[in-house]
Image: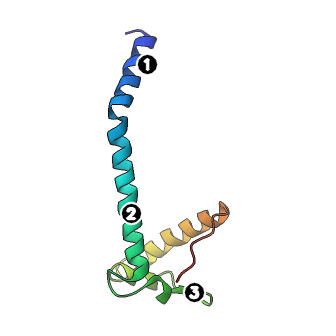
Amino acid sequence: MAYDEARFFASVRVSIFGGRLRAAQLAGTRTILAGCRKAIAGSFTGRRLADFFGAQREDWEGARAIINGSDRARLGAGHARAFHRALVAARIEPARVR
């Protein structure tokens, strides 16, 4: 198959499946955001983000209780710290805890 033909078929495939792919990406994003909102509000375990983070407090390992038990809390805290550092490095202000 010639390069131009391959490029044409690739573009057709993208245009055919593009709408479905975009819908799946948006649905995934909505699911993640809904989970974040529930975690912030304390909907999963009754423990809210504000219970662990504030002006005078950062409890990265204890924050695991927002979602579930304390198993592998240190690992989760490491991931959270790394993500927070990346946000700060990118100069994206983390949302304020209400």
| Residue of label 3 | 54
Q: Amino acid at mark 3?
A: Gly
**Sequence order check, earlier mark of 3 and 1:** 1
Q: Secondary structure at mark 3?
A: strand
Q: Is residue 64 above or below residue 11?
A: below
Measured in 3D between alpha carbons, the distance from the residue under mark 3 to the one under mark 1, in whole angstroms, is 53 Å
In percent of width and height, residue 26 lies at: 39, 52
In percent of width and height, residue 85 lies at: 61, 67
Measured in 3D between alpha carbons, the distance from the residue under mark 2 to the one under mark 1, in whole angstroms, is 34 Å
| Residue of label 1 | 7
In percent of width and height, residue 80 lies at: 50, 71
Q: Is residue 82 above or below residue 17?
A: below
The image quarter containing residue 81 is: bottom right
Q: Residue at x 60, y 64 (%)?
A: 87
How many numbered marks, from 0 up? 3
Which disc number belongs to residue 39?
none
**Sequence order check, earlier mark of 3 and 2:** 2
Q: Amino acid at mark 2?
A: Ile
Q: Residue at x 59, y 71 (%)?
A: 94
| Residue of label 2 | 32
